[in-house]
């Protein structure tokens, strides 16, 4: 259940990251409210996962999921450039998240 909560926290973090730009530097009230709600939800879910997972592992996986999701959505939704360097960075992040997961009980 802790890994499920952590995965959900990462997905909410992706939504939170995407919700920042529409706030226009926190000048638009409704998008700002959505942004803050998503931020609190992501951190709450992360905290729940950290009840049983090591802090370092949980935070690394949480930020890794967020980074991969933010880059992927940037490419798909915002037409961000796809370069060899960015794809290598994504592969390394995914590999790190997987490694953190499979070695968590060591």
Image: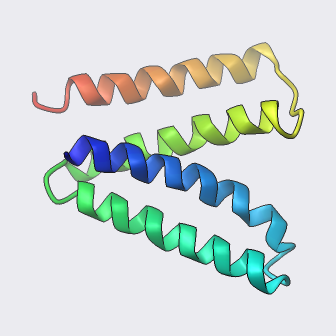
Left or right relative to 23: residue 46: left
Residue 41 in which image quadrant: bottom left
Look at the picture and state if 19 lies above or below 63: below
Look at the picture and state if 10 lies above or below 29: above
**x%, y% of residue 6?**
33, 48
Please, which residue is most extreme toward the left here?
Answer: 106
At a point 56% along the width and 18% down the height, the residue shown is: 91
Left or right relative to 77: residue 7: left
**x%, y% of residue 28?**
84, 82
Look at the picture and state if 94 lies above or below 5: above
At a point 55% along the width and 75% down the height, the residue shown is: 37
**x%, y% of residue 79?**
89, 33
Depth check: 55 or 24 in front?
A: 24
Image quarter in which the N terminus is found: top left
**x%, y% of residue 72?**
69, 32
At a point 82% along the width and 38% down the height, the residue shown is: 77
Residue 4 in which image quadrant: top left
Depth check: 46 or 95 in front?
A: 46
Look at the picture and state if 100 lies above or below 11: above
């Amino acid at each position: 259940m802790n890994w499920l909560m952590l995965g959900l926290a990462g997905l909410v973090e992706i939504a939170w990251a995407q919700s920042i730009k529409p706030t226009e530097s926190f000048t638009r009230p409704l998008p700002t409210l959505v942004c803050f709600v998503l931020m609190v939800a992501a951190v709450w879910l992360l905290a729940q996962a950290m009840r049983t997972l090591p802090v370092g592992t949980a935070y690394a996986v949480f930020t890794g999921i967020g980074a991969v999701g933010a880059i992927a959505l940037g490419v798909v939704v915002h037409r961000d450039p796809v370069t060899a360097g960015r794809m290598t960075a994504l592969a390394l992040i995914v590999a790190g998240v997987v490694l953190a997961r499979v070695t968590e009980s060591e």
